[in-house]
Image (tube, rainbow, N blue to C red):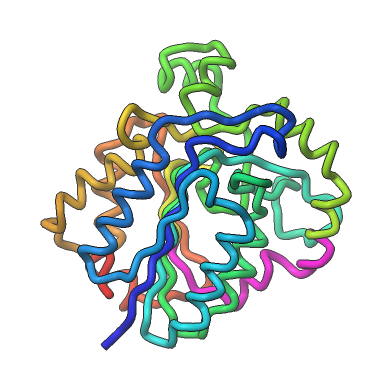
Amino acid sequence: MATGLSLHVGLNKVDPAKYGGWDGELVACENDANDMARLAREAGFDDTTLLTPDGTVDNVTAELRKAAGRLKSGDILMFTYSGHGGQVPNTVGSDDELDDFDETLVLYDREFLDDELYREFARFDEGVRILALLDSCHSGTGIEVREVLSPEAMKEQFQTSDPNRIENTSRLMPVAKQYEIYQRDKEFFQEIQRALGTGNGGEEKVNALLISGCQDNQLSSDGPVNGKFTGTLLEVWDGGTFRGGYRAFHRDIVRNMPATQSPNFHVTGRPGDAFLEQRPFTV
């Protein structure tokens, strides 16, 4: 019998001491993590949840490495993240980033590069099914970040063109704060990028499916209970009544989302049609 392990990370804040006084307060990310953990548990996964102060780089990598040590070919990992998304320039690493940026998950103590996440996924045995669900801004591929929404699209999605209000109602790490943190920690990030070297921490070894909260050039909305993406995913799943594969699941989520926030379906490597055609969350 296959084994399913899941890790759910939800951050309603970050440590202001690590982010130059910015605490990145959000509303619904812990709810997202708890609700996705409950979904995973009901589907037969052994779930772990890391909320706000526990959502550190060390804790996330430790849990992923524990899972990599347990799962074998035919098993499944589900990784979900709800929180801010950010970017750092990729000027010293590989040329895999078409826009010269690495996307980041804004964890409690520092930004976690997309290449670092792929490095952790590369530790899993070949044949382990990997499903990642990211409810954060610029999460379309977890790799490429192009131009952000136009002012008109931002006004449509967030009912305002005020950048301060947009940053408060979306899961976007403020652009000015991204620049400030990068300038402060440039050598640290560049050392990570040098160490990772060849493209996404070993992307060629990773066979994974990512369903993200939005496209690369879009922002993900926070909400009073759940993020817009996670809330819609839960509605489509409908307590397990959904029937169909991952592609149909993604299509139904997209149909219920506003045009300004279109979840992406992104495959890395060759996860295999058998996996993609399974009913979502099948262990």
The image quadrant where one finds the C terminus is bottom left
Query: Looking at this view, is 274 or 192 the one in front?
Result: 192
The x, y position of residue 65, in whole percent, is 56, 74
The image quadrant where one finds the N terminus is bottom left
- Is residue 218 visible from the viewing direction of this image? no
In the rendered image, the residue lying farthest to the left is 241
In the visual, does 7 lie left or right of 256?
Answer: right
- Is residue 171 visible from the viewing direction of this image? yes
30 to 148, vertically: above or below: below
The x, y position of residue 20, in whole percent, is 74, 30
68 to 31, vertically: above or below: below
- Which range is magenta? 193-209
The x, y position of residue 7, in whole percent, is 43, 62
Query: Looking at this view, is 228 or 37 the one in front?
Result: 37
Residue at (44, 82) in percent of width and height: 71
**Residue 140 included in the magenta stretch of the image:** no
